[in-house]
Amino acid sequence: MKNGVRAQQKEQTKQALIREGRRLFATLGYNAVGLSEIVSAAGVTKGALYHHFDSKVSLFRAVLEQVQREVAERIAANADAEADPWSRLTTGCEAFLDATADPNIQRIMLIDGPAVLGWEAWRTIDEEASVQHLTHALSELMESGAIRKQPLVPLTHLLSGAMNEAALWLAQTPDPQSLAETKAVLRQILEGLRVKEPVG
């Protein structure tokens, strides 16, 4: 019984550190946040933090992975609500733009993520989350003949990169119409992949 309580307390401590770390990283940015601030906000000691995370970077990575998972789940939920593969692709892509319109998500996922972890580590996390859904959607459309057969990996990365760049741009523009305009342009780009006549 004691072991179960201890394990539960450890998990609660870990989640408190991730929760407070996420809040501070999102509002202040990674570089402006110190470990002392995080442990104080979480109500734990630095020793407790180091039991779970060996550095501020490793805590940030856990926060980023949580954010990426949440965004991926939101994309999947929106896409899976659509009946046909083409609508799943377009809805999923638009759901990504909607999710990353949140300044807190932009800061952690798109601005600090690559800068703190480096591009390779950031891309690995990105691929394990959102990129997998995009790859699956494009593969499904190629198999059905809705889009022309072509190399899947470069197509996926081109679209993913374009959407990440669009999300970063949207974070910098004050124009409230920008999100709707970006979605409209994205739909045109995706429509350009679509086979207009059935493949036969």
Image (spheres, rainbow, N blue to C red):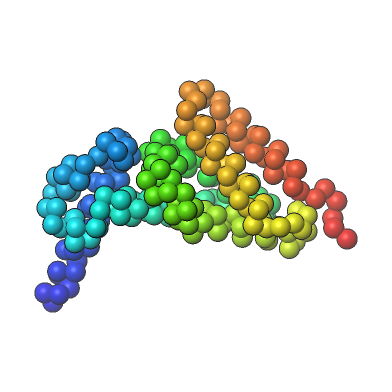
Q: Above or below — where is 57 with respect to 112?
A: below
Q: Which quadrant would the N terminus be assigned to in this image? A: bottom left
In the image, 182 versus 115, the foreground residue is: 115
35 left or right of 57? left
Q: Above or below — where is 87 with respect to 37?
A: below
Question: What residue is at 19 percent from the left and 55 percent from the top?
Answer: 49
| Total numbered labels placed on residues in the image | 0
Image quarter of residue 33:
top left
Q: Decide if residue 157 is in sight here.
A: yes
Q: Above or below — where is 35 with respect to 132?
A: above
Which residue in the rendered view is the most extreme toward the bottom? 1
Question: What residue is at 56 percent from the left and 25 percent from the top?
Answer: 177
Question: What residue is at 55 percent from the left and 59 percent from the top?
Answer: 132
In the image, 62 versus 8, the foreground residue is: 62
Question: What residue is at 60 percent from the left and 33 percent from the top?
Answer: 182
Q: Decide if residue 105 is in sight here.
A: no
116 left or right of 141? left
Q: Residue 127 at x, y = what percent?
A: 51, 56
Q: Residue 10 at x, y = what percent?
A: 18, 63
55 left or right of 172? left
Q: Which quadrant would the C terminus be assigned to in this image? A: bottom right
In the image, 194 versus 172, the foreground residue is: 172
